[in-house]
Amino acid sequence: MGEEFSCLAAKSAVRRKTLTLVQLGKMGSSDTTSDLHTAISEFVSEELSPHENFATLVAVFEEPNGLTEPEFDELMWQQLTDLHHLDLDRGFAWAPDVAEDPASPDFAFSLAGHPFFVVGMHEHASRISRRYDGPALAFNSNHQFRRLKQSGVYYGLQRRIRQREERLQHSINPNLTEFGEASDARQYSGSATDEQWRCPFQPRGGTASGS
């Protein structure tokens, strides 16, 4: 993880040895979807803890490489949709404390009954801090963000992240919003969005209970 990567929370996970790295095959394939869902389920049950605020899972895909930003955006949402369908097939309900509607400010992506904020990375990302050698997705616990916000640590991290983005690219990501004030979905791929943007992901079925 290079110096240009501006997410200090992810760098903290590396230092604290709480980063789980999963190497996978072709992004969007059925085998990859199955393997990734299994890895996330294990991560939720074995690695996440109410006493740890910097655990993250990063999925690195072997292919496809050379994706343009629109191509990555489309593939990322396809991969997340496939994960959602498999999540339901494996008996998991949507995390009960977040919204399923990707337009809601309370939305978070649910897998294995746990809410996540997803960070997409690829080699041709317009945001320098989102560039990686190939396609990758980082899954960060929504609960961790809440605890960091409640403790006041979140605001210091946010300020430092934005300062690093300013130094790196002389601007901050225009999609950045305050946590919980607008839907985080528009931030997932790193692509710029406008007011007319609609999230490609739609959950299957109604709100599930339990988990």
Image (cartoon, grey):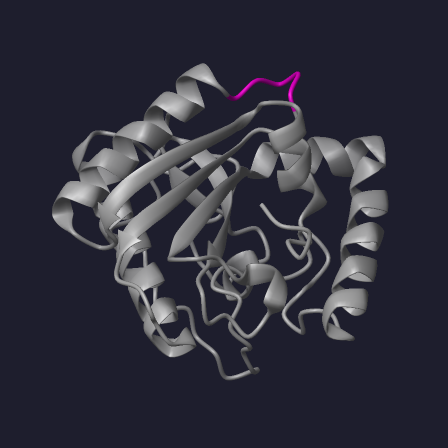
Residue 66 sits above or below residue 5 on the image: below
Residue 69 sits above or below residue 119 on the image: below
Total marks placed: 0
Q: Is residue 159 left or right of residue 56?
A: right
Can you say which quadrant of the picture contains the C terminus? top left
Q: Is residue 45 left or right of residue 18?
A: left
Determine the residue positioned at 35% across, 22% down: 42
Region of the chain picked out in magenta, as a range: 48-52
Residue 145 sits above or below residue 128 on the image: above
Considering the whole magenta stretch, tell me its main secondary structure. loop
Name the spot of residue 87 as percent of width and height, x first.
26, 38
Can you say which quadrant of the picture contains the N terminus? top right
Name the spot of residue 173 as percent of width and height, x first.
67, 69
Q: Quadrant of residue 150?
A: top right
Foreground of the two, 117 or 94: 117
Q: Quadrant of residue 195?
A: bottom right
Q: Is residue 198 magenta?
A: no
Name the spot of residue 43 as percent of width and height, x first.
41, 24
Determine the residue positioned at 52% across, 62% down: 131
Q: Residue furthest left?
A: 30
Q: Quadrant of residue 59?
A: top left
Any part of residue 23 in sight: yes
Any part of residue 54 in sight: no
Q: Is residue 29 left or right of residue 134?
A: left
